[in-house]
Amino acid sequence: MREEDMEQDLLKLSGLKAPVADASRKADALARAMQAFEVQENNAGGTQAFRQAVRQSSIITTLWSRLMTGKSRLTTAFATLLLVPAAGWLTFQYVSSHRVTPPAGVSQPAEVTKQKPVASGAAADKNIVAKSDENPPALNNPVVALAAPKPLASLPAKVPASPAADAEQASETAVAPLAAAQRQRTVEAKRLAPQTAEAAVAPEIVMPEPSDTPQPPQMRMTDNRFTGSDVNPVKSVVEEPVSTFSVDVDTASYAFVRQSLNSGMLPEPDSVRVEEMINYFPYDWPKPALAEEPFRASVTVLPTPWNRDTQLMHVAIQGYDLPKTSQPDANLVFLIDVSGSMDEPNKLPLLKSAFRLLVNRLKPTDTVSIVTYAGDSGVVLEPTKARERDKILAAIDALQPGGGTNGASGIEQAYALAKSAFVKQGVNRVMLATDGDFNLGPSDDGSLKRMIEEKRRSGIFLSVLGFGNDNYNDSLMQVLAQNGNGTAAYIDSLPEAEKALVEEAGSTLFPIARDVKIQVEFNPARIAEYRLIGYETRALARQDFNNDAVDAGDIGSGHRVTAIYEITPKGSPATRIDDLRYGKPQALLPDDGEPAASADELAYVKIRWKKPDGDKSNLITQPVTARNVVPTLEAAAADIRFSIAAAAFGQKLKHEPGFDSYGYDQILTLATPARGQDPFGYRAEFLNLLRLAEGLTPGP
């Protein structure tokens, strides 16, 4: 052919318009490209993508090469005019002669919507897009637009990409959780995306990151750690008439239960400590008149609401409330976990806000230091008087998360700093704020317990503030608080931080007694059996009561402690343990050698305590007689009835025996008229938690 004729033909071709392929054929082309790439990967020695002698893409490549390297007088512009219509014609021919079913789960959209990036913590090589607030995320594709993902509720467990995958999915007998479905979509997208430069003609597939879509709370995976313990058993008074335990003024369990229920989940039974459910609330127990005897105990015996054949012995202890003018200066060291695990909204950011509340409450003469720990520990703020409030708050605001969790190193440095600024006749306290995820240095409970036991001899108390609901180590929190002369609280919200650190700051910061133990001896002539409700982790041996070397719980200014026994009167049909065939009830003398109990005594209550800076214990005693008995539940004070409702709630959540037939609605009926004065709304919140628990409990 003459060159003049060739040029004429090319000019005619340049005027042609490429046919427009419809959306379905574009989807078909994409599916075939994906399928061909899989064949290429599985048949390294064979023909890639298509089993044809010559690929159509090679035709274009060859033609382009000849045009550009030949001796023709065609310019680059003419070559372009040739290539564009030819490429369109080849595409039209290909999609017209091939129909491929798209992979399962892929459909065709009505339109392609421009999308904008969404902030995320995903890796940099992932393209994360959002379509709009009104529409679900769509797949961003310059050539072929796939349908937007279905809502999570309708997603299958997997998105198969081949007949083999379809068969594998069909063989599965269980539907994976929604979170697994979301992750599977991401995995499939990465597998189907182009892997080589030659395969770059296949469009890039963009999947939404799983974290971009909130999951139902009941589907959230957590790795919380709690110390499991069997509930206290029923004991025979004839065989074991004495019950001994350490007081517990912690409230962490109640706050964690509340967080779980508000998130739409029933709490883990091991996370429920009934005594902390009871002691969470303010009660108006009779107060001691003088600081010299810092406790006043009041005992009430009344019918049991969940068992008409037993009674409850309610022991209420109120601590002396130091006037603000009498509160000593405080030397506080904030030991703050800034490791990577604290990088959550309900961890470090909430922690910083909580400490800001506390700093604003301190006296100008109080002292604050800050130690942080991650992979290592360091001093962020040397001992600084609270009058320099702006300096302290700036140091708190500057905290940033990152790194491992060498908590042991931080504890060592915090105690050293507290010792350097030690205040004689004052309060010296380390306040540890963490999720408990210690993974560097000594991190097992035993090693940390021994470390804290050694540190407490220095006269420095410990408070533990727990944060977070994922990977939360409650077990470690309890070990540290119980062995460090301290208390444990769980901070799930700013109002809880205000309660623990502002409203109850006196009881949190200023101890009035340490190593407080309670011992109750029951009269076998009147009581057949008893069961202590809660305090499983605080049990002591009988001989530990008089041993001043044995550590026990501490009580702060104005603190309240409530303990409840379920007792079975002699002759009651509720008695579970048979009498001994060869033994007779023996009247046991009290430990202090007093005369045998009189016939009308039901029990004898004893309390041992030490002054905050003392080593020798003091003793308070009180007999329980018929004068302490209230004939009906309704005749008891509102605070007593409400505390019993809190005890019932905890036992119900813990699945204790005997509570299957006592429902949340009955607890609500008991608690509602006992709400009384509720200035901070804690009791109203409790009533709502009862309703949530009832709604979340599966039917029979």
Image (tube, rainbow, N blue to C red):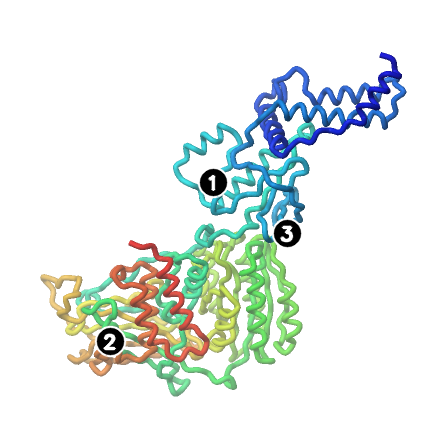
627 relative position to 379: left or right: left
1 or 3: tag closer to the N-terminus: 3
Q: Position of residue 473 (x, y in %)?
A: 46, 57
Question: Mark 1 Cα within 10 Å, few/some/many (few <14, many 20+)?
Answer: many
Residue 592 visible: yes
Can you tell which quarter of the image residue 631 is in?
Answer: bottom left
Q: Residue furthest top?
A: 1
Q: Position of residue 78 (x, y in %)?
A: 85, 25
- In the picture of the structure, the residue carrying the numbered disc 3 is 119
Residue 552 visible: no
Relative vertical location of residue 76 with respect to residue 477 in this rendering, above or below: above
366 relative position to 683: left or right: right
- In the picture of the structure, the residue carrying the numbered disc 2 is 302
Question: Mark 2 Cα within 10 Å, few/some/many (few <14, many 20+)?
Answer: many
141 relative position to 509: left or right: right
Q: Position of residue 169 (x, y in %)?
A: 45, 34
Element type at mark 3? loop
Q: Residue furthest left?
A: 581
Nearest to the observer: residue 259 or residue 274: 259
Cβ atoms under marks 3 and 2 closer than 8 Å: no
Name the residue: 27% across, 80% down.
Answer: 622
Residue type at numbered disc 3: Ala
Give the distance between the C-alpha atoms of the residues marked 3 and 2, in whole angstroms: 59 Å
Name the residue: 27% across, 61% down.
Answer: 659
- In the picture of the structure, the residue carrying the numbered disc 1 is 156
Instruction: Give the quarter of the figure containing the C terminus.
Output: bottom left
Residue type at numbered disc 1: Pro
Element type at mark 2? strand
Give the distance between the C-alpha atoms of the residues marked 1 and 3, in whole angstroms: 26 Å
3 or 2: tag closer to the N-terminus: 3
